[in-house]
Image (cartoon, rainbow, N blue to C red):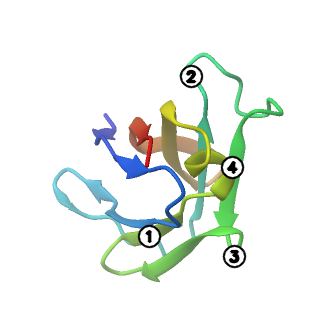
Amino acid sequence: MPDIQTVPVTQGDTPTRTFRITSSGAALNLTGVTVTAVIKPTIGTSDDDNAAHPLTVGAGLTIVDAAAGTVRMDIPSAVTTSPGWWFYKIQVTSSGHPETAVEGLMPVSPA
């Protein structure tokens, strides 16, 4: 079951957020796995929709400490310039099997 977190941001900021990916309460070692994320207008929006913002390691995501399971998400300006409620999820793929590790709402409040 994914960890559910609300990630509030303010319009016009250039925020980053760091997450700790866990499995059964312990840090999930991210060595050798693929970590991706997507931020989209609604939970029902397809991950590959033009309104979605996919993030990968090196393009919006950074593995901060693989052994500690920490990953940093750089929230795109296309999101922070659009006040409202967004949905995000972070997925970990191992052996070709993606699993949502963290998901939640990302309210962008007007500046």
Residue drawn at x 49%, y 62% is 13
User: Neighbour class for label 2 at 10 Å: few (<14), some, many (≥20)?
Assistant: some
Cα distance in 3D space between marks 4 and 3:
18 Å
Which amino acid does the dot numbered 4 rest on?
Ala
First in residue order: circle 1 vs circle 3: 3
Q: Are marks 1 and 3 in contact (CB under 8 Å)?
A: no
User: Which element is circle 1 on?
Assistant: strand
User: Which element is circle 3 on?
Assistant: loop
* Residue where numbered disc 3 is placed: 58
Residue at the extreme front of the image, as rendered? 111
Q: Is residue 25 left or right of residue 75?
A: left
Q: In the picture, residue 97 is in which quadrant?
A: top right
* Residue where numbered disc 1 is placed: 71
Q: How many marks do you count on the picture?
A: 4
User: Which element is circle 2 on?
Assistant: loop
* Front tag of 4 and 2: 4
**Does residue 58 lie above or below 6 as drawn?**
below
Which amino acid does the dot numbered 2 rest on?
Thr
First in residue order: circle 2 vs circle 1: 2
